[in-house]
Image (spheres, rainbow, N blue to C red):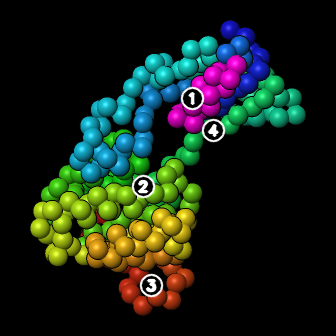
Amino acid sequence: MTNHFQILIVGGGNAGLSVASQLLRKNARLQIGIIDPADKHYYQPAWTLVGAGIFDIKKTERDQKDFIPKGTTWIKEAVTAFAPEQNQVSTTLGNTYSYDALIVCPGIQLDWAKIAGLKESLGRNNVSSNYSFGHAAYTWEMIKNFKGGTAIFTNPSSPIKCGGAPHKIMYLAVDYWRKKGILDKCNVHYLSGSSIIFGIKEYAATLEGVVRRGHIQTHFGVNVVAVEGANRRISFETKEPSVQQIEASFKDCNIF
């Protein structure tokens, strides 16, 4: 296998594979290398639908080798260092690969430890996340078995893979509870690190209507700092005066 490529792509997720495929459509003779150590490829956008009970989690997992575009070289390693002055990258196996052009799209590292107690609480005690293959199905169990009470949906203040995912699952849950006839028993809160419901004003206007119809209480400028799964409690900090009027934590809640 060559150690030099016209185009070297770091990351074999949806972004890296899509870029490689589009480039090959323009010029099938390009020498493209894709660096990614994963054995499995996950179609993560469907995890929201898994959490809503309308998609099988098993169908989101496939063998990575089946998605590497024909005509590219798959380097099954992980990058440990970049040397842009030399147009090179180094990998976990001690190899060095050079390039004419480099495309970096390795995805975002999930930091569960950023919120105290979250990692220990996930998948039990009515705490779940659709950003995890191992927990998305548990979200549906929570929604399906919810009989009423406080339901908390959170959106962090840090960058995330899909900005719409945290409230998409909330709208799907509210719709399910409405059809089930228990929405009037549900106290739904949305804690978001953003300052608005959505960054595109046309979409935001529509979503604000969805929020009103779902009787969802929104809290913006909120940063969740701790989750106590066993005690069913979530704590947060905020600079918003309107949010400071309520207690900076929720008790006896289900956290999505």
Q: Which residue is mark 3?
A: 243
Relative image position of residue 144 (x, y in whole percent): 17, 55
Identified by mark 3, the residue type is: Val
Q: Mark 3 and mark 4 in contact (Cβ < 8 Å)?
A: no
Gap in angstroms between the C-alphas marked 1 and 3: 42 Å
Q: Is residue 19 magenta?
A: yes
User: Upstream in the sequence, badge 2 or badge 1?
Assistant: 1
Q: Which numbered circle lies on residue 165?
A: 2
Relative image position of residue 223 (x, y in whole percent): 49, 71
Identified by mark 1, the residue type is: Leu
Q: Which numbered circle lies on residue 105?
A: 4
Gap in angstroms between the C-alphas marked 2 and 3: 23 Å
The picture quadrant where one finds residue 116 is bottom left
User: Upstream in the sequence, badge 4 or badge 2?
Assistant: 4
Q: Which residues are magenta?
A: 13-27
Q: Report helix, strand or loop for mark 4.
A: loop
